[in-house]
Amino acid sequence: MNKNQEIALIFERISNMLSVLDENPFKIRAYKKAALNISELGEDIVERAEQDGLTSIPGVGKDLAAKVKEYIDTGKITEYEKLSKTVPLELIELLRIQGLGPKTLSLLFKELKVRSLSDLEKVLDGDEILEFRGLAEKKIKDIKKGISIFKESKERTLLGVALPISELIINAIENIPGTEGTVVAGSLRRFRETVRDIDILTMSDNTEETVKEFTQMPFVKDVLASGSTKGSVIAGDSLNAGIQVDLRVVGPESYGAALQYFSGSKAHNVRVRSLATKKGLKINEYGVYKGDKKVAGETEHEVYESLGLPFIPPELREDRGEIEAALENTLPDLIELSDIKGDLHTHTTWSDGKATIKEMAESAKKLGYSYIAITDHSPSSVIANGLSLKRLALKKKELEEADKKIKGIKILMGTEVDIKPDGTLDYPDKVLKELDVVIASVHSGFKMDIETMTERILSAVRNPYVHAIGHPTGRLINERDPYEVDIDRLIEAALEHGKALEVNGSYPRLDLKDLHVRKAVEAGVKIIISTDAHRTEQLLQMKLGVGTARRGWVEKDSVLNTLETKELLEWLSMYR
DNA sequence: GCCGTTTTCGGCCCGACTGTTTTCAGTCG
C-alpha cells in the first residue's frame, strides 16, 4: 500500500468511527470524500505535500491537510490514534452488516458495550436488547439475517461475472407483460471493475405487479425490500449466490431521470444536483423541475441538456473532471467497441489456450475483425506450455497455412514473451525480429521492490522488437495485488520509445486499470486493447477492455487496434 | 470538515422502504 492508500484508509476509518459516535454527519462525509479523492489522486501525495498543494485536492482543507502532513512526517495521525482508543476497529467493520447502520450501532456500543461481532451476536440473543426503543423483534431478526450475509460475504463481484448475470435477469424481466426498456444501471453500467450489486431499471404500466413478479423469480433466495416502485433481493445458488439485485420500476415520463439517477456514481450525482440547484432547478429520479413545472425526464439526454450540459457517457460519471469538461464542452469522444478492428493478444492450444489457431481466427472473423494476432507463451512459462524455438517454428508453419486458407482476416504471428527477472526476454532478438507482434509480460518473480521491477519492465520497453507491454501491473482483481511498478516511469519510457501499453480486457485483470490508462493516453502513449483470450468465447471480453478504456477517457486515436490492417502493419513494422 | 460569480457563515442531494413512529427515524442507494 502506498501513502495515498494508507491515508485514504485512515480517513475512511475516522469517518466510520465518527459515525458510530453519532457525530456531525457533514464532518463524517467530509472525511469520506477526502478519502476517496486521495485514493484516486494519481500522484504521490508526498510529492503533492512537498509542493505545498495539499489543499488543492478537492475535499481537503486546512485541517485535513495538516493531518496528511502529520502522517507524512510522523507516520501517525493523532486524531486517529485517539479515536481508535475509544472505538475499536472491529466495531466499525460491523457497519458493513445490512440493516445495521451507525445509529443503531452507536446505541449498541454506548449502551450495551458491543465492541465486536461476537458481542453483537450475544446481545441480539439476550433479553436486554428488547428494552430498546426501535429495536423490536423484526428488526433484530433483520440484523441477524444481515450478520449471516456478512459472514458469507465475499468481496465485490467482478464486472465480467456480474455483466452476464445482469443480462439473464434483464431477459427475465422483459418477459413480464407490460415491461419495456429494461436496462442495467449502477456501477455495472459504468463498467466499474467490480460491483457490489446489480441495479436494473425498467418501465412498466403496472409497477407494483412488476416488482412483485421480480421478487418471486426462481433465482431469488431472500427478499430485502418490495414496494410499489422498488424491489431488492439476494440471489441464490442458481446465479452468483449472495449478490444483491435491485430493481426500480418507473413510468416512461421519468425513465431518463431514473436512469441518470440510478447510474450514479453518487459523487457524480451530488455534483449534478448542486449544479441544478445553482440554476434554480430541482432534480430527482422522476425528473428535473423548475418550481412545480417538470422540464425534463423522459431521456437522459434531456436531463443533462436541461442543466446546460452535453450527454455524459456513464463510464465517465465518477466526478473525475467530467462535469468540468462537460461545462467547457471538452468531453472526450470516447472509443466504441465497433471501432476495434482486431485482437492483438490471444492464445491457442499451442500453449495454454483451448482453441486452435483456425478456431480463434474464424471466431475473430465472425466478430467482424480484420486481423487477429496469435500470441502464445514463451518457454519460461512452463506451466502455460510455453513454446520452445522448435515448436515456435512449427506453429509458424501452421499459422501461415491457416492464414492462406481463411479469407477475410489477417492472422498475425506473435508471442507473449516473458520478461525474465533480470529484465531480459525469453526469446533472443533474432527470433523476436521475425514475429509480427511481440507483447512482453511479467509472469513470475512478482515480489520485487519497485525500483528493480520498474527497471525490469523498462528493459523490455527498450528492446527494439517489443511492441507492447502486456497487463503492465500484473494484478488479479480480488486475488493478487499488482506488483510494484512505477507507472509514471513506465508511461514516460513507453512514450520515449514509442511503445504501446496494453489494456487487458480479461475480467480478472482489466490491466491497465481506468486511472492508469487515462494517465497513459494523456501523456500521449498509444494503447492496445486486447482480450488475452484462451478460448473463442473470451474474445467477447473486448467489451470489458473497451469499457475500461472508456473509463480512462480513451479516444479512438490512442488505440492501435482501431487501425485498418495496412496501417497497423506499418506501425508494427517500425520495430523491425 | 469543506466551501463560496448569490455566502468567510451557513449551508452541505434526495427519495423509497421498513418498522412500530400514530407523524417519524433509520437505513440504503
Image: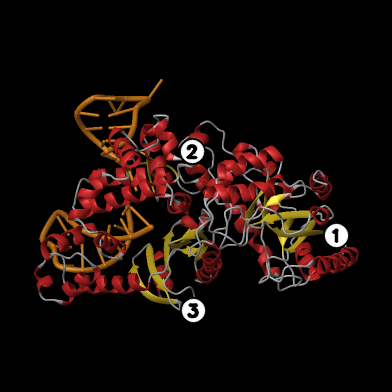
Asked which secondary structure carries label 2, the reply is loop
Q: Which residue is mark 2?
A: A321
Q: How would you rate the neighbour count of disc 2 (Cα within 10 Å): few for under 14, some for 14-19, many for 20 or more?
A: few
Q: CA distance from mark 1 to mark 2?
A: 42 Å
Q: Residue at x 50, y 39 (%)?
A: A322
Type of the residue with mark 3: Ser
Expressed as whole percent of the image width and height from the top left, the position of residue A430 reads 83, 54
For mark 1, what is the residue?
Answer: A408
Q: What chain does mark 3 sit on?
A: A
Task: Using the rendered view, name the quadrant where residue A496 is placed.
Answer: top right
Query: Residue A488 at x, y = what percent?
Result: 56, 41
What amino acid does circle 1 point to?
Gly
Q: The disc labelled 2 sits on which kind of residue? A: Gly
Residue A309: image location, x then y, percent: 50, 36
Lower sequence index among marks 1 and 2 = 2
Q: Which residue is mark 3?
A: A238
Residue A285 is left or right of residue B17, and the answer is: right
Secondary element type, mark 3: loop
How many angstroms separate mark 3 from mark 2 (CA)?
Answer: 40 Å
Is A293 situated left or right of A380 in this image? left
Label 1 residue SS: loop
Across and down, in percent, residue A251 comes to 44, 57
Q: Earlier in the sequence, mark 1 or mark 3?
A: 3
